Amino acid sequence: MGTVRRLTKNGAPAFLAVDFFCGAGGTTRGLIDAGGYVIAGIDKDQRCGVTYSENNFNSSVDFANSRFLHYDVFPKDTDYEAGQQLELMDKLDSLIGYYKGKVPKVPLLFAICAPCQPFTSVSRKALSESRKKGREKDRNLLAQAAVYVERYMPEMVLSENVAGIRDPKYGGIWEDFRRHLENLGYATGSKVVCTSKFGIPQFRKRSILVAVRKELVREGYLNDTISGELTVPPSDPGAVMVSVAEAIGHMPSIKAGETHRDIPNHRARTLSDLNLKRMSSAKPGQSNAYLATTSFGDLTLDCHRKVNQRLNNKCFTDVYTRMHPDRPSPTITTKCHSISNGRFGHFDVLQNRGISLREAAILQSFPEDYVFYPTEQIEPIARMIGNAVPPRLAKFFAGYLIAASARH
């Protein structure tokens, strides 16, 4: 997973980029590793700002860090006072104009990876009314991002989201965004891919949308010249599948509740005595059926037992279990630090704990020197890691877009 940075012969970046909804910078990291210069990342969550800025330094032009722009992309109106569209456009006018002047022949890429929570299966009953309204507004983020595409007409667009965003129950948001790009003059392509096929040690299905301005598309990258649809690669032909043990097996052993003194974010969540018993009884890759027959007795959760009896079926079989060492990990979520929220137990039976934040970041393909702040906290960092676009995925598709474009 070493970093490969491609620059043009004259030392200019392969492309300029703006990363919308950048979060902690997974997409930005991938774009820089693909040889791009990321002008800025935009996000309304200021808690990601330090992590984003401290980890993403460009390797061309002025060698500056990627700027974190704390803005709300929506327009301000009587119903939404927080909107900052005009201010953001003024800022982007200045920044994009400046860097286009510095490297005038370098293409521009917009990464638009909107928050995925509005398109996941979390029960709406678990959300407050304010959060429900926020998620409903967030469903319009792609349409709002298209306004910026129309204003600046970047040569390339890359979008990533959960596989479920394509579901008709979300009102065709993904296809509407794609159709909008096509109406603006882009050739587009869309596919659901699994990150494990791109050298990322994780099973994570994602919807990918790529777009290149039609007049720039290389013919060999089209499914057919009549429809003008871009091919979306289902895998990285140069990558091999990476297992959990290969990815994190070298990390120093720590205990539940412990933080490694020398490795930032190598910190595991504390476990109760009961959960330590559960973990000590769990075998790598197995279901949690073991809970009924441990040496400590039946450790099955009462709530799970009741659900299983009512449905006459085994449910929640991945919680309180260990990862399989010889396979990629399950999807890393915002609860990746918690053994009660999925198969997040460490594969090593000598370590009775969930995976650490650092290990979760590695499974997301972040470099090991990518530090998440504030380092003394768990929940905010797990949220950043789980919400991130895997850098290696962004790197691959940025490189693909550059290859598909005649302007490089």
Image (spheres, helix red, strand yellow):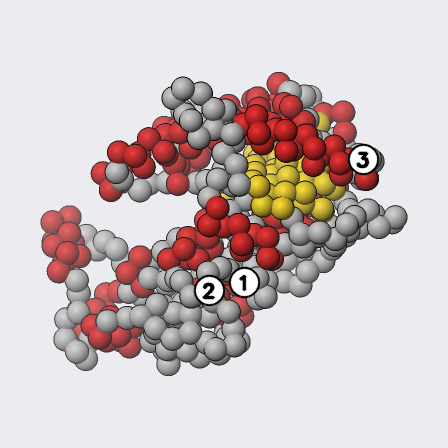
Residue plotted at (84% across, 50% down): 11
Q: Are marks 1 and 2 in contact (CB under 8 Å)?
A: yes
> Along the line of sight, which residue is nearer the eye, 347 or 384?
384
Q: Residues within 10 Å of mark 2 (few under 14, many from 20)?
A: some
Question: Is residue 285 visible to the viewer in this orientation of the structure?
Answer: no
The picture places residue 144, in percent across and down from the top left corner, at: 51, 26
Q: Secondary structure at mark 1?
A: loop
- Callout 3, which amino acid? Gly
Farthest residue toward the right?
Answer: 10
Q: Are marks 3 and 2 in contact (CB under 8 Å)?
A: no
* Res. 375 mark: 2
Whichever of labels 1 and 3 marks the residue nearer the N terminus, that label is: 3
The picture places residue 224, in percent across and down from the top left corner, at: 68, 28
Q: Secondary structure at mark 2?
A: loop
**Which residue is identified by label 1?**
371
The picture places residue 210, in percent across and down from the top left corner, at: 62, 35
> Along the line of sight, which residue is nearer the eye, 345 or 50?
50
Q: Secondary structure at mark 3?
A: helix
Estimate the spatial distance between the alpha carbons at disc 1 and disc 2, rounded to whole Å. 8 Å
**Which residue is identified by label 3?**
101
Can you tell which quarter of the image residue 118 is in? Answer: top left
Estimate the spatial distance between the alpha carbons at disc 3 and disc 2, rounded to whole Å. 38 Å
Can you tell which quarter of the image residue 136 is in? Answer: top left
Residue 341 to residue 397: above or below: below
Question: Is residue 73 visible to the viewer in this orientation of the structure?
Answer: yes
